[in-house]
Image (spheres, helix red, strand yellow):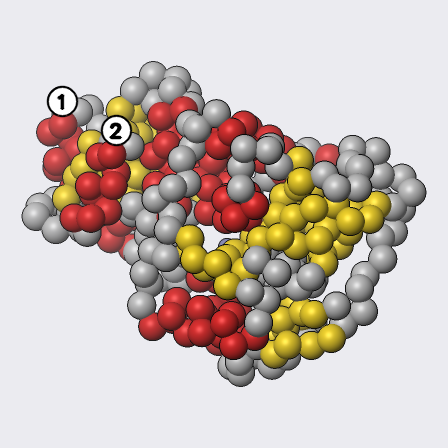
Amino acid sequence: MKAVRLVEAGRPLEMRDVPRPSPGPSDVLVRVRAAGICHSDAHYRAGKSRVHPLPLTLGHEVAGIVEEIGAGVKKFRLGDRVCLHYLATCGECEFCRTNNEQFCPTGAMIGKYRDGGFAEFILMPERSVFELPDGIPFEHGAIMMCSSATSLHALNKARLSSGETVAVFGVGGLGVSAIQLAKALGAREVFAVDINPRKLALAERFDAIPVDASVGNPVARIRELSGGRGVDVALELVGLPVTMRQAVQSLAILGRAALVGLTRETFEIASYSELLNREAEIIGVSDHLASEIPLLLDLARTAKLDLSPDIIRTVPLEVSAVNRALDRLEAFSDDLRVVITP
Ligand SMILES: [Zn+2]
Ligand SMILES: [Zn+2]
């Protein structure tokens, strides 16, 4: 089968002919119908984030059709529409058994530590495969498996409950999903912080209260808009020390700040006034869980999660098209989502 692979970090991806994998007893072989090209893939190609072992087929946002199943597979039949949770896990270790499978010691992310979806077929253990409802296009099913799933996990980690208030720092792909998911989970008010007027307008379209961080301190504005109280949950989706600090500073008493954006830099907080005195919490968020995907798909099916703001362009499974899409992601972070449809 054809596969677009990272052969060496720092070099363009290459098209290779590789053997079509055959399923073990609990595996599902999926014919790829959509594979999203993510900003992370640009980092992987550039060597900013480790991919192992090379050569390896990239692609961690995948939806398709069941082509073949192992003898022990119960949930699926040939021809089923499916999407993939991007972690292949053992299902048996202490982390898998306690629903924290992103820490499974033998767990492997597709397109990073095992072959991903930039190919005609992909192999996945049954437990990481989910039925894609009929009304959801393959392209949406694919891109949901990364940013939307992570936004939902962040809200879950922050223990958002109905009637609470939320501030979302950064209205990119994650943020647009986070706003809608917070509303769907019963958030009373969602503040959306950004500096880009177009993104603030988009946030408003989804019923969020825009907070323009380019014209003043967003923390002061959130306090003002919430009658001095602050928010119960703040999500930091940007990955900058300044927004991490603002997320913590915008918390109400007993508030929780979930940090999602990646940075290697440190940030400072005033421990007494901003954390201890409010019994506030700072929570780290990494990846998402297979158990969160059914709810995510259900919210998309019932239009509570609308992926139409993601402008999707499709490209064929051709190496030049994929490399060009990655070049564009590196050059400027436009909102266009490119999805490979083999
Ligand atoms: Zn991704
Ligand atoms: Zn495990």
Horizontal and vertical percent position of residue 299:
49, 28
Per the image, the residue denoted by label 2 is 207
Q: Quadrant of residue 303?
A: top left
**Direction from residue 199 to residue 52 in the image, left or right:** right
Which element type, helix, strand or loop, lies under badge 1? loop
Which element type, helix, strand or loop, lies under badge 2? loop
Per the image, the residue denoted by label 1 is 227
Q: Residues within 10 Å of mark 2 (few under 14, many from 20)?
A: some
**Direction from residue 82 to residue 256 in the image, left or right:** left
Horizontal and vertical percent position of residue 140:
50, 44
**Direction from residue 308 to residue 115 in the image, left or right:** right
Residue at 40%, 24% (x, y): give it.
Answer: 184
Query: Which image quarter holds the C terminus?
Result: bottom right
Residue at 38%, 42% (x, y): give it.
Answer: 308
Q: Nearer the viewer, residue 291 or 313?
A: 313
Q: Residues within 10 Å of mark 1 (few under 14, many from 20)?
A: few
Mark whose residue sits in front, 2 or 1: 2
Horizontal and vertical percent position of residue 300:
48, 32
Query: Which image quarter holds the N terminus?
Result: bottom right
Horizontal and vertical percent position of residue 15:
64, 77
Q: What type is the residue that disc 1 sits on? A: Gly
Q: Quadrant of residue 201?
A: top left
Q: Residue lying farthest left?
A: 215
- Vertical side of 296 occupied by 140: above or below: below
Any mark on residue 118, and which? none
- Vertical side of 142 occupied by 278: above or below: above
Residue at 66%, 64% (x, y): give it.
Answer: 119
